[in-house]
Image: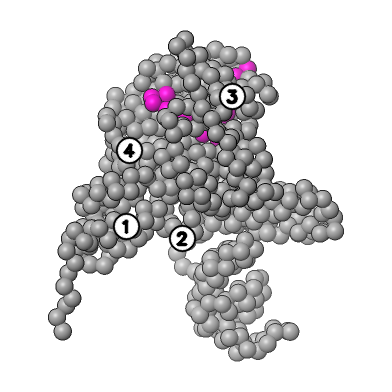
Amino acid sequence: MPPPPELCRDLLVDILTRLPPDDPGCLFRASLVCTAWRALLTSPEFARHYREVHRTPPLLGFFENHDTVTPWFAPSSPAASPFPPLFPDRRALHVLDSRHGLVLLSNPIRITENDHAVSLIVWDPVGRRQWESFPPPDFASTILCDVGVVVCAADDCDHLGCHGSPFLVGYVGTDYRSAHASVFSSETNSWSPVVSCPHPDVEILRGQPKPLVGNAVYFICEYHPDESFILCFDLFSRKLSKFDGPPIHHYKYALMKTEEGVLGCASMEGSRLCLWSTETGPDGAVAWMESRVIDLHKLLSSNSFLHVIGFEDRAGVYYLTADYGVATVDLKSGQVNKMSIIHSNIVPYTSFYTPDQAVEVAQQGRWEEVGDKEEEADEEVEQQVEKAVQELFTKGSKALKDEDFVGAEDCKRRILEIRVAHHGKLSPKCRSAYHNYGCALLQKPLPNQDSVKSTTTQSNTERDIVEDLDLAWKMLHVARPISEKSPGSTTEKYKLFAALARVSVERGDMNYSLIACFKALANMEHLLEPDYRHIINQKPTHTFCLRVAVQDWRCKGYLIVHVTCRGPEKGQSSFVG
Protein backbone atom coordinates (compact mmCIF):
# COMPACT_ATOMS: atom_id res chain seq x y z
CA MET A 1 0.00 0.00 0.00
CA PRO A 2 1.57 3.33 -1.03
CA PRO A 3 2.26 5.90 1.72
CA PRO A 4 -0.23 8.77 2.04
CA PRO A 5 0.68 11.89 0.11
CA GLU A 6 2.60 14.52 2.03
CA LEU A 7 0.94 17.80 2.93
CA CYS A 8 2.14 20.75 0.91
CA ARG A 9 4.49 22.99 2.87
CA ASP A 10 2.19 26.03 2.91
CA LEU A 11 -0.72 24.01 4.26
CA LEU A 12 1.51 22.40 6.90
CA VAL A 13 2.82 25.80 7.99
CA ASP A 14 -0.75 27.09 8.27
CA ILE A 15 -1.77 24.11 10.45
CA LEU A 16 1.25 24.24 12.74
CA THR A 17 0.99 28.01 13.15
CA ARG A 18 -2.41 27.47 14.80
CA LEU A 19 -0.84 25.61 17.74
CA PRO A 20 -1.26 27.72 20.91
CA PRO A 21 1.82 29.76 21.92
CA ASP A 22 0.94 29.53 25.65
CA ASP A 23 1.58 25.76 25.51
CA PRO A 24 5.02 25.57 23.84
CA GLY A 25 5.08 21.79 24.30
CA CYS A 26 2.68 21.46 21.34
CA LEU A 27 5.34 22.66 18.91
CA PHE A 28 8.02 20.48 20.50
CA ARG A 29 5.84 17.37 20.32
CA ALA A 30 4.99 18.14 16.70
CA SER A 31 8.71 18.35 15.88
CA LEU A 32 9.04 14.66 16.84
CA VAL A 33 6.57 13.47 14.19
CA CYS A 34 9.13 13.16 11.39
CA THR A 35 12.35 14.64 10.05
CA ALA A 36 10.53 17.01 7.69
CA TRP A 37 8.40 18.47 10.47
CA ARG A 38 11.43 18.86 12.71
CA ALA A 39 13.33 20.69 9.97
CA LEU A 40 10.38 23.03 9.47
CA LEU A 41 9.71 23.75 13.14
CA THR A 42 13.37 24.37 13.98
CA SER A 43 13.87 26.80 11.10
CA PRO A 44 14.21 30.51 11.97
CA GLU A 45 11.78 31.33 9.14
CA PHE A 46 8.91 29.37 10.74
CA ALA A 47 9.66 30.81 14.19
CA ARG A 48 9.58 34.36 12.80
CA HIS A 49 6.30 33.67 10.95
CA TYR A 50 4.80 32.06 14.07
CA ARG A 51 5.60 35.12 16.21
CA GLU A 52 4.31 37.56 13.59
CA VAL A 53 0.98 35.71 13.36
CA HIS A 54 0.37 35.57 17.12
CA ARG A 55 1.93 39.00 17.80
CA THR A 56 1.54 39.03 21.58
CA PRO A 57 4.15 37.01 23.55
CA PRO A 58 2.21 34.51 25.68
CA LEU A 59 2.18 34.42 29.46
CA LEU A 60 4.12 31.27 30.32
CA GLY A 61 3.86 31.65 34.09
CA PHE A 62 4.91 33.56 37.17
CA PHE A 63 8.04 33.73 39.27
CA GLU A 64 7.09 33.73 42.96
CA ASN A 65 9.49 35.30 45.43
CA HIS A 66 9.50 33.65 48.81
CA ASP A 67 11.51 34.38 51.95
CA THR A 68 12.27 30.73 52.69
CA VAL A 69 12.73 28.97 49.35
CA THR A 70 14.35 29.79 46.05
CA PRO A 71 12.11 31.73 43.62
CA TRP A 72 9.42 29.43 42.33
CA PHE A 73 8.15 29.25 38.74
CA ALA A 74 4.42 28.51 38.47
CA PRO A 75 3.06 27.72 34.96
CA SER A 76 0.20 29.94 33.85
CA SER A 77 -2.18 26.97 33.60
CA PRO A 78 -2.08 23.28 34.61
CA ALA A 79 -2.37 22.31 30.95
CA ALA A 80 0.68 24.32 29.93
CA SER A 81 3.93 22.51 29.31
CA PRO A 82 6.48 22.75 32.16
CA PHE A 83 8.82 25.67 31.64
CA PRO A 84 12.15 23.95 30.91
CA PRO A 85 14.87 25.99 32.69
CA LEU A 86 14.87 26.41 36.46
CA PHE A 87 17.29 28.97 37.83
CA PRO A 88 20.83 30.06 37.04
CA ASP A 89 22.36 28.55 40.16
CA ARG A 90 21.71 27.69 43.78
CA ARG A 91 22.35 31.05 45.41
CA ALA A 92 19.84 33.10 47.42
CA LEU A 93 18.29 34.83 44.41
CA HIS A 94 15.37 37.27 44.24
CA VAL A 95 13.48 38.03 41.01
CA LEU A 96 13.30 41.80 40.48
CA ASP A 97 11.82 42.11 37.00
CA SER A 98 10.98 40.30 33.78
CA ARG A 99 10.56 41.93 30.40
CA HIS A 100 11.18 41.15 26.72
CA GLY A 101 11.97 37.51 27.53
CA LEU A 102 14.66 38.41 30.08
CA VAL A 103 14.65 38.00 33.87
CA LEU A 104 16.54 40.24 36.30
CA LEU A 105 17.61 38.70 39.61
CA SER A 106 19.48 40.07 42.60
CA ASN A 107 21.96 38.07 44.60
CA PRO A 108 22.73 39.45 48.09
CA ILE A 109 26.34 38.94 49.14
CA ARG A 110 27.55 39.08 52.73
CA ILE A 111 31.06 40.56 52.83
CA THR A 112 31.39 40.94 56.60
CA GLU A 113 28.94 40.84 59.48
CA ASN A 114 28.00 44.48 58.89
CA ASP A 115 28.84 44.93 55.19
CA HIS A 116 26.62 43.62 52.42
CA ALA A 117 26.64 43.95 48.64
CA VAL A 118 24.48 42.77 45.77
CA SER A 119 25.15 41.41 42.31
CA LEU A 120 22.63 41.56 39.47
CA ILE A 121 22.01 38.67 37.10
CA VAL A 122 20.31 38.98 33.72
CA TRP A 123 18.95 35.60 32.72
CA ASP A 124 17.52 34.49 29.39
CA PRO A 125 15.64 31.28 30.31
CA VAL A 126 14.69 30.46 26.71
CA GLY A 127 18.11 31.21 25.22
CA ARG A 128 19.77 29.63 28.29
CA ARG A 129 22.23 32.47 28.75
CA GLN A 130 23.06 34.60 31.74
CA TRP A 131 25.20 37.57 32.67
CA GLU A 132 26.26 39.04 36.01
CA SER A 133 27.63 42.37 37.18
CA PHE A 134 27.92 44.49 40.32
CA PRO A 135 26.17 47.90 40.52
CA PRO A 136 28.35 51.00 40.97
CA PRO A 137 29.95 50.82 44.43
CA ASP A 138 29.53 54.56 45.14
CA PHE A 139 25.88 54.03 46.07
CA ALA A 140 25.14 50.30 45.99
CA SER A 141 26.86 49.72 49.34
CA THR A 142 24.54 52.17 51.13
CA ILE A 143 21.25 51.11 49.55
CA LEU A 144 18.60 49.86 51.96
CA CYS A 145 15.77 49.22 49.48
CA ASP A 146 16.34 48.47 45.81
CA VAL A 147 14.49 47.57 42.62
CA GLY A 148 15.60 46.96 39.07
CA VAL A 149 14.34 46.62 35.51
CA VAL A 150 15.69 44.96 32.38
CA VAL A 151 14.70 46.02 28.85
CA CYS A 152 15.73 45.15 25.33
CA ALA A 153 17.91 47.92 23.85
CA ALA A 154 17.83 46.89 20.17
CA ASP A 155 16.81 49.62 17.72
CA ASP A 156 13.36 49.21 16.08
CA CYS A 157 12.75 45.90 17.86
CA ASP A 158 9.18 44.58 17.98
CA HIS A 159 10.07 42.58 21.13
CA LEU A 160 8.55 39.38 19.75
CA GLY A 161 11.82 37.48 19.74
CA CYS A 162 14.64 39.67 21.00
CA HIS A 163 16.65 36.91 22.72
CA GLY A 164 20.32 37.68 22.24
CA SER A 165 19.71 41.40 21.62
CA PRO A 166 21.55 44.09 23.60
CA PHE A 167 19.85 45.09 26.84
CA LEU A 168 19.77 47.80 29.50
CA VAL A 169 19.51 47.27 33.25
CA GLY A 170 18.11 50.08 35.35
CA TYR A 171 18.99 49.85 39.04
CA VAL A 172 17.29 52.17 41.53
CA GLY A 173 17.71 52.27 45.30
CA THR A 174 16.94 54.42 48.33
CA ASP A 175 18.83 55.08 51.54
CA TYR A 176 16.14 57.06 53.46
CA ARG A 177 17.71 60.34 52.34
CA SER A 178 17.67 60.10 48.55
CA ALA A 179 16.81 57.89 45.62
CA HIS A 180 19.75 56.89 43.41
CA ALA A 181 19.83 55.30 39.96
CA SER A 182 22.21 54.04 37.31
CA VAL A 183 21.96 52.15 33.99
CA PHE A 184 24.06 49.27 32.69
CA SER A 185 24.43 48.81 28.93
CA SER A 186 25.40 45.39 27.57
CA GLU A 187 26.77 47.11 24.45
CA THR A 188 29.31 49.24 26.34
CA ASN A 189 29.65 46.79 29.24
CA SER A 190 29.60 49.69 31.71
CA TRP A 191 27.40 51.57 34.19
CA SER A 192 26.31 55.16 33.71
CA PRO A 193 27.12 57.86 36.32
CA VAL A 194 24.84 57.70 39.35
CA VAL A 195 22.01 60.25 39.47
CA SER A 196 20.10 61.15 42.64
CA CYS A 197 16.79 62.63 43.71
CA PRO A 198 16.82 63.82 47.35
CA HIS A 199 13.82 63.23 49.59
CA PRO A 200 13.77 62.61 53.37
CA ASP A 201 12.69 59.21 54.68
CA VAL A 202 12.16 57.89 51.17
CA GLU A 203 11.75 54.13 50.66
CA ILE A 204 11.17 52.51 47.27
CA LEU A 205 8.62 49.70 47.32
CA ARG A 206 9.61 46.23 46.15
CA GLY A 207 7.15 43.77 44.67
CA GLN A 208 5.22 46.47 42.78
CA PRO A 209 4.71 46.66 38.98
CA LYS A 210 7.29 48.84 37.19
CA PRO A 211 5.72 49.94 33.89
CA LEU A 212 7.90 51.00 30.97
CA VAL A 213 6.29 53.95 29.17
CA GLY A 214 8.42 55.22 26.31
CA ASN A 215 11.97 55.29 27.65
CA ALA A 216 10.99 55.83 31.27
CA VAL A 217 10.30 53.39 34.10
CA TYR A 218 8.05 54.30 37.04
CA PHE A 219 8.20 53.21 40.70
CA ILE A 220 6.17 53.85 43.84
CA CYS A 221 8.03 55.36 46.80
CA GLU A 222 6.73 56.05 50.30
CA TYR A 223 8.06 58.52 52.86
CA HIS A 224 5.38 58.18 55.57
CA PRO A 225 2.96 55.32 56.26
CA ASP A 226 0.22 57.15 54.33
CA GLU A 227 2.28 59.34 51.99
CA SER A 228 3.83 58.33 48.66
CA PHE A 229 5.02 59.67 45.32
CA ILE A 230 6.00 58.33 41.90
CA LEU A 231 9.66 58.09 40.90
CA CYS A 232 10.43 58.35 37.16
CA PHE A 233 13.74 57.14 35.72
CA ASP A 234 14.48 57.71 32.03
CA LEU A 235 16.80 54.91 30.91
CA PHE A 236 18.19 56.85 27.94
CA SER A 237 18.46 60.45 29.18
CA ARG A 238 19.47 59.09 32.65
CA LYS A 239 17.19 61.61 34.40
CA LEU A 240 15.56 60.88 37.76
CA SER A 241 12.46 62.85 38.77
CA LYS A 242 9.40 62.59 41.01
CA PHE A 243 5.74 63.66 41.08
CA ASP A 244 2.61 63.01 43.13
CA GLY A 245 0.71 59.77 42.79
CA PRO A 246 -3.08 59.38 42.37
CA PRO A 247 -5.42 60.26 45.26
CA ILE A 248 -5.45 56.63 46.41
CA HIS A 249 -3.54 54.87 49.20
CA HIS A 250 -0.37 53.47 47.62
CA TYR A 251 -1.01 49.94 48.89
CA LYS A 252 -4.27 49.86 46.92
CA TYR A 253 -3.14 50.63 43.37
CA ALA A 254 -0.72 49.29 40.80
CA LEU A 255 1.04 51.37 38.14
CA MET A 256 0.47 50.35 34.51
CA LYS A 257 0.79 51.47 30.91
CA THR A 258 -2.62 52.38 29.52
CA GLU A 259 -4.03 51.50 26.10
CA GLU A 260 -3.28 55.09 25.04
CA GLY A 261 0.41 54.54 25.85
CA VAL A 262 0.62 56.82 28.90
CA LEU A 263 1.22 56.13 32.58
CA GLY A 264 -1.84 54.99 34.50
CA CYS A 265 -2.85 52.91 37.47
CA ALA A 266 -5.55 50.46 38.52
CA SER A 267 -7.22 49.92 41.87
CA MET A 268 -10.13 47.94 43.30
CA GLU A 269 -13.11 49.38 45.19
CA GLY A 270 -15.15 46.38 46.21
CA SER A 271 -15.86 44.56 42.94
CA ARG A 272 -15.19 47.65 40.80
CA LEU A 273 -11.96 47.99 38.84
CA CYS A 274 -11.04 51.69 38.72
CA LEU A 275 -8.64 52.81 35.98
CA TRP A 276 -6.70 56.08 36.12
CA SER A 277 -4.53 57.82 33.52
CA THR A 278 -2.16 60.80 33.52
CA GLU A 279 -1.93 64.00 31.52
CA THR A 280 1.20 66.12 31.34
CA GLY A 281 0.68 69.87 31.10
CA PRO A 282 2.84 72.39 29.20
CA ASP A 283 4.78 73.09 32.37
CA GLY A 284 5.52 69.39 32.88
CA ALA A 285 3.06 68.97 35.76
CA VAL A 286 1.39 65.54 35.90
CA ALA A 287 -2.35 65.31 36.62
CA TRP A 288 -4.30 62.12 37.44
CA MET A 289 -7.83 61.45 36.12
CA GLU A 290 -10.16 58.50 36.64
CA SER A 291 -10.80 57.29 33.10
CA ARG A 292 -12.92 54.16 33.49
CA VAL A 293 -14.74 52.02 36.06
CA ILE A 294 -15.50 48.35 35.34
CA ASP A 295 -17.74 46.21 37.55
CA LEU A 296 -16.28 42.70 37.90
CA HIS A 297 -19.14 41.43 40.08
CA LYS A 298 -20.28 38.94 37.42
CA LEU A 299 -16.76 37.67 36.79
CA LEU A 300 -15.48 37.31 40.35
CA SER A 301 -16.85 36.08 43.64
CA SER A 302 -18.60 38.95 45.42
CA ASN A 303 -17.22 38.02 48.87
CA SER A 304 -13.57 38.02 47.75
CA PHE A 305 -11.19 40.72 48.93
CA LEU A 306 -9.61 41.97 45.71
CA HIS A 307 -6.41 43.90 45.13
CA VAL A 308 -4.66 44.77 41.84
CA ILE A 309 -1.05 43.59 41.75
CA GLY A 310 -0.18 43.91 38.07
CA PHE A 311 -1.15 44.45 34.45
CA GLU A 312 0.20 43.04 31.18
CA ASP A 313 -0.35 45.86 28.67
CA ARG A 314 0.31 43.86 25.48
CA ALA A 315 -2.13 41.12 26.48
CA GLY A 316 -4.61 43.36 28.29
CA VAL A 317 -4.64 41.11 31.36
CA TYR A 318 -4.95 42.28 34.98
CA TYR A 319 -3.52 40.32 37.92
CA LEU A 320 -5.59 40.38 41.11
CA THR A 321 -5.18 38.86 44.54
CA ALA A 322 -8.26 37.38 46.17
CA ASP A 323 -9.06 35.23 49.20
CA TYR A 324 -8.24 32.09 47.21
CA GLY A 325 -4.95 33.37 45.75
CA VAL A 326 -4.11 35.06 42.44
CA ALA A 327 -6.42 35.43 39.44
CA THR A 328 -5.98 36.84 35.93
CA VAL A 329 -8.77 38.89 34.35
CA ASP A 330 -8.90 39.42 30.58
CA LEU A 331 -11.35 42.25 29.94
CA LYS A 332 -11.36 41.63 26.17
CA SER A 333 -12.52 38.01 26.41
CA GLY A 334 -14.19 38.25 29.83
CA GLN A 335 -12.20 35.24 31.05
CA VAL A 336 -11.06 34.80 34.65
CA ASN A 337 -8.40 32.23 35.48
CA LYS A 338 -7.64 31.25 39.06
CA MET A 339 -3.95 30.45 39.48
CA SER A 340 -2.39 27.91 41.83
CA ILE A 341 -0.53 30.79 43.50
CA ILE A 342 -1.04 32.08 47.04
CA HIS A 343 1.63 34.74 47.50
CA SER A 344 1.20 38.12 45.82
CA ASN A 345 4.93 38.83 45.31
CA ILE A 346 4.96 37.57 41.75
CA VAL A 347 6.69 38.54 38.50
CA PRO A 348 4.94 37.46 35.25
CA TYR A 349 7.09 35.91 32.50
CA THR A 350 5.99 36.35 28.88
CA SER A 351 7.89 34.99 25.90
CA PHE A 352 7.57 32.85 22.81
CA TYR A 353 9.32 29.50 23.15
CA THR A 354 9.78 27.67 19.85
CA PRO A 355 11.88 24.61 18.88
CA ASP A 356 14.43 26.69 16.96
CA GLN A 357 15.50 28.31 20.24
CA ALA A 358 16.17 24.92 21.85
CA VAL A 359 18.77 23.98 19.22
CA GLU A 360 20.68 27.25 19.30
CA VAL A 361 24.14 27.09 20.77
CA ALA A 362 24.26 29.04 24.03
CA GLN A 363 26.38 32.15 23.69
CA GLN A 364 28.57 33.49 26.43
CA GLY A 365 27.41 36.81 27.89
CA ARG A 366 29.50 39.95 28.03
CA TRP A 367 29.11 40.18 31.78
CA GLU A 368 31.03 37.88 34.01
CA GLU A 369 29.58 34.42 33.40
CA VAL A 370 27.73 33.04 36.40
CA GLY A 371 29.22 29.94 37.88
CA ASP A 372 28.12 27.67 40.67
CA LYS A 373 30.82 28.65 43.15
CA GLU A 374 29.95 27.20 46.51
CA GLU A 375 32.80 27.79 48.89
CA GLU A 376 33.36 25.28 51.65
CA ALA A 377 33.12 26.69 55.13
CA ASP A 378 35.99 26.12 57.48
CA GLU A 379 35.75 23.34 60.01
CA GLU A 380 34.99 25.59 62.98
CA VAL A 381 32.02 27.30 61.29
CA GLU A 382 30.77 23.91 60.09
CA GLN A 383 30.81 22.61 63.65
CA GLN A 384 28.89 25.66 64.89
CA VAL A 385 26.25 25.17 62.22
CA GLU A 386 25.83 21.49 63.00
CA LYS A 387 25.62 22.22 66.73
CA ALA A 388 22.84 24.79 66.18
CA VAL A 389 20.99 22.39 63.89
CA GLN A 390 21.28 19.54 66.38
CA GLU A 391 19.94 21.71 69.23
CA LEU A 392 16.93 22.74 67.13
CA PHE A 393 16.39 19.14 66.02
CA THR A 394 16.30 17.96 69.64
CA LYS A 395 13.96 20.77 70.60
CA GLY A 396 11.69 20.05 67.63
CA SER A 397 11.57 16.33 68.39
CA LYS A 398 10.51 17.06 71.96
CA ALA A 399 7.83 19.48 70.72
CA LEU A 400 6.53 16.83 68.33
CA LYS A 401 6.43 14.26 71.12
CA ASP A 402 4.45 16.73 73.25
CA GLU A 403 2.11 17.33 70.26
CA ASP A 404 3.26 20.94 70.05
CA PHE A 405 3.03 20.98 66.24
CA VAL A 406 3.48 24.75 65.94
CA GLY A 407 6.70 24.60 67.96
CA ALA A 408 7.95 21.64 65.91
CA GLU A 409 7.21 23.51 62.68
CA ASP A 410 9.13 26.55 63.95
CA CYS A 411 12.19 24.43 64.76
CA LYS A 412 12.14 22.76 61.32
CA ARG A 413 11.80 26.17 59.67
CA ARG A 414 14.80 27.55 61.58
CA ILE A 415 16.87 24.48 60.66
CA LEU A 416 16.04 25.10 57.00
CA GLU A 417 17.02 28.77 57.29
CA ILE A 418 20.39 27.84 58.82
CA ARG A 419 21.08 25.18 56.17
CA VAL A 420 20.11 27.49 53.30
CA ALA A 421 22.15 30.42 54.61
CA HIS A 422 25.24 28.23 55.04
CA HIS A 423 25.10 25.87 52.04
CA GLY A 424 22.87 27.56 49.45
CA LYS A 425 19.22 27.00 48.60
CA LEU A 426 19.71 24.00 46.31
CA SER A 427 22.59 22.32 48.10
CA PRO A 428 22.22 18.55 48.65
CA LYS A 429 22.78 19.24 52.35
CA CYS A 430 19.44 21.10 52.43
CA ARG A 431 17.36 18.22 51.04
CA SER A 432 16.35 16.75 54.40
CA ALA A 433 15.65 20.24 55.81
CA TYR A 434 13.17 20.98 53.00
CA HIS A 435 11.61 17.54 53.41
CA ASN A 436 11.26 17.79 57.19
CA TYR A 437 9.84 21.32 57.08
CA GLY A 438 7.29 20.27 54.47
CA CYS A 439 6.21 17.31 56.57
CA ALA A 440 6.01 19.53 59.69
CA LEU A 441 3.56 21.80 57.87
CA LEU A 442 1.45 18.75 57.02
CA GLN A 443 1.39 17.66 60.67
CA LYS A 444 -0.27 20.84 61.90
CA PRO A 445 -3.77 19.93 63.12
CA LEU A 446 -6.86 21.46 61.54
CA PRO A 447 -8.69 24.00 63.76
CA ASN A 448 -11.81 22.94 65.64
CA GLN A 449 -14.81 23.98 63.54
CA ASP A 450 -16.74 24.95 66.68
CA SER A 451 -14.10 27.53 67.54
CA VAL A 452 -14.33 29.15 64.11
CA LYS A 453 -17.45 31.27 64.49
CA SER A 454 -17.29 34.43 62.43
CA THR A 455 -17.19 34.47 58.62
CA THR A 456 -14.03 36.58 58.66
CA THR A 457 -12.25 34.23 61.06
CA GLN A 458 -13.31 31.21 59.03
CA SER A 459 -12.08 32.83 55.81
CA ASN A 460 -8.71 33.67 57.41
CA THR A 461 -8.43 30.14 58.82
CA GLU A 462 -9.15 28.56 55.45
CA ARG A 463 -6.58 30.84 53.82
CA ASP A 464 -3.97 29.84 56.46
CA ILE A 465 -4.64 26.16 55.73
CA VAL A 466 -4.29 26.73 51.98
CA GLU A 467 -1.04 28.68 52.51
CA ASP A 468 0.39 25.90 54.71
CA LEU A 469 -0.48 23.27 52.10
CA ASP A 470 0.93 25.43 49.33
CA LEU A 471 4.18 25.99 51.24
CA ALA A 472 4.44 22.29 52.16
CA TRP A 473 4.02 21.36 48.50
CA LYS A 474 6.77 23.80 47.48
CA MET A 475 9.16 22.60 50.22
CA LEU A 476 8.77 19.00 49.08
CA HIS A 477 9.12 19.98 45.44
CA VAL A 478 12.40 21.74 46.17
CA ALA A 479 13.62 18.59 47.90
CA ARG A 480 12.50 16.39 44.99
CA PRO A 481 15.05 17.43 42.28
CA ILE A 482 17.84 17.44 44.88
CA SER A 483 16.89 13.91 45.92
CA GLU A 484 16.47 12.65 42.35
CA LYS A 485 20.06 13.62 41.53
CA SER A 486 21.31 11.00 43.98
CA PRO A 487 21.68 7.58 42.34
CA GLY A 488 19.54 4.57 43.14
CA SER A 489 16.40 4.13 45.19
CA THR A 490 16.47 5.12 48.83
CA THR A 491 14.06 5.12 51.74
CA GLU A 492 14.31 8.93 51.74
CA LYS A 493 13.01 9.03 48.16
CA TYR A 494 10.13 6.75 49.10
CA LYS A 495 9.14 8.95 52.05
CA LEU A 496 9.50 12.11 49.96
CA PHE A 497 7.19 10.91 47.19
CA ALA A 498 4.74 9.54 49.77
CA ALA A 499 4.61 12.99 51.39
CA LEU A 500 4.14 14.60 47.97
CA ALA A 501 1.24 12.22 47.33
CA ARG A 502 -0.38 13.20 50.60
CA VAL A 503 -0.06 16.96 50.17
CA SER A 504 -1.32 16.67 46.58
CA VAL A 505 -4.47 14.94 47.82
CA GLU A 506 -4.96 17.67 50.42
CA ARG A 507 -4.64 20.30 47.68
CA GLY A 508 -7.10 18.44 45.43
CA ASP A 509 -4.50 17.50 42.81
CA MET A 510 -5.33 13.80 42.38
CA ASN A 511 -3.39 13.46 39.12
CA TYR A 512 -0.05 14.36 40.67
CA SER A 513 -0.91 12.36 43.80
CA LEU A 514 -1.21 9.22 41.67
CA ILE A 515 2.13 9.95 39.99
CA ALA A 516 3.83 10.48 43.37
CA CYS A 517 2.27 7.28 44.75
CA PHE A 518 3.56 5.31 41.80
CA LYS A 519 7.09 6.67 42.26
CA ALA A 520 7.00 6.02 46.02
CA LEU A 521 5.95 2.42 45.55
CA ALA A 522 8.43 1.90 42.71
CA ASN A 523 11.26 3.08 44.97
CA MET A 524 10.09 0.72 47.71
CA GLU A 525 9.97 -2.16 45.26
CA HIS A 526 13.59 -1.65 44.22
CA LEU A 527 14.68 -1.32 47.83
CA LEU A 528 13.07 -4.50 49.14
CA GLU A 529 12.90 -6.78 46.10
CA PRO A 530 12.49 -9.76 46.00
CA ASP A 531 10.78 -10.08 49.40
CA TYR A 532 7.68 -7.97 48.71
CA ARG A 533 6.26 -8.75 52.14
CA HIS A 534 8.63 -6.14 53.61
CA ILE A 535 6.77 -3.44 51.70
CA ILE A 536 3.76 -4.07 53.91
CA ASN A 537 5.85 -3.80 57.06
CA GLN A 538 6.98 -0.26 56.15
CA LYS A 539 4.21 1.43 58.11
CA PRO A 540 4.80 5.15 57.43
CA THR A 541 2.38 6.26 54.70
CA HIS A 542 2.42 2.95 52.74
CA THR A 543 -1.26 2.30 53.36
CA PHE A 544 -2.08 5.83 52.23
CA CYS A 545 -0.17 5.28 48.98
CA LEU A 546 -1.87 1.96 48.35
CA ARG A 547 -5.33 3.38 48.91
CA VAL A 548 -4.71 6.25 46.52
CA ALA A 549 -3.04 3.94 44.01
CA VAL A 550 -6.28 2.04 43.41
CA GLN A 551 -7.17 4.84 40.99
CA ASP A 552 -4.19 4.26 38.71
CA TRP A 553 -3.67 1.12 36.60
CA ARG A 554 0.11 1.42 36.92
CA CYS A 555 -0.14 0.72 40.65
CA LYS A 556 -2.43 -2.34 40.43
CA GLY A 557 0.57 -4.69 40.76
CA TYR A 558 1.39 -3.20 44.17
CA LEU A 559 -2.23 -3.59 45.24
CA ILE A 560 -2.19 -7.28 44.33
CA VAL A 561 0.99 -7.70 46.37
CA HIS A 562 -0.64 -5.85 49.27
CA VAL A 563 -3.77 -8.03 49.31
CA THR A 564 -1.87 -11.27 48.73
CA CYS A 565 0.64 -10.68 51.51
CA ARG A 566 -1.58 -9.11 54.10
CA GLY A 567 -5.22 -9.26 53.11
CA PRO A 568 -7.61 -6.29 53.13
CA GLU A 569 -7.39 -3.56 55.73
CA LYS A 570 -9.86 -3.68 58.58
CA GLY A 571 -13.24 -2.42 57.46
CA GLN A 572 -12.18 -2.50 53.80
CA SER A 573 -13.55 -4.74 51.08
CA SER A 574 -11.23 -7.38 49.70
CA PHE A 575 -12.15 -6.23 46.21
CA VAL A 576 -9.77 -3.46 45.15
CA GLY A 577 -10.89 -2.96 41.55
Instruction: Tell me if residue 154 can be seen.
Output: yes
Q: Disc 2 residue type?
A: Ala
Tell whether label 4 touches label 1 (CB within 8 Å): no
Instruction: Pick whichever of labels 1 and 4 is earlier in the sequence.
Output: 1
Instruction: Tell me if residue 134 can be seen.
Output: no
Q: Disc 4 residue type?
A: His
Q: Secondary structure at mark 4?
A: loop
Q: Which residue is mark 3?
A: 246
| Residue 38 position within the rendered picture, expressed as x and y whole percent measured from the top left | 23, 61
Range of magenta residues? 201-216
Disc number placed over residue 159 in the picture, else none:
4
Q: Disc 3 residue type?
A: Pro
**Which quadrant of the rendered structure holds the N terminus?**
bottom left
| Residue 203 position within the rendered picture, expressed as x and y whole percent measured from the top left | 59, 23
Using a 10 Å C-alpha cutoff, classify the residue at mark 3 as few (fewer than 14 neighbours), some (14 to 19) or many (20 or more): many
Q: Secondary structure at mark 2?
A: loop
Disc number placed over residue 435 in the picture, else none:
none
Q: Secondary structure at mark 1?
A: loop
Work out how far the residue at label 3 is from the one at label 4, CA to CA, in angstroms: 30 Å
Q: Which residue is mark 2?
A: 79
* Nearer to us in this view, 545 or 244: 244
Q: Residue at x 36, y 36 (%)?
A: 131
- Which-is-in-front pick, marks 1 and 4? 1
Using a 10 Å C-alpha cutoff, classify the residue at mark 1 as few (fewer than 14 neighbours), some (14 to 19) or many (20 or more): few
Using a 10 Å C-alpha cutoff, classify the residue at mark 4 as few (fewer than 14 neighbours), some (14 to 19) or many (20 or more): many
Work out how far the residue at label 2 is from the one at label 4, CA to CA, in angstroms: 26 Å
- Which-is-in-front pick, marks 3 and 2? 3
Q: Which residue is mark 1?
A: 18
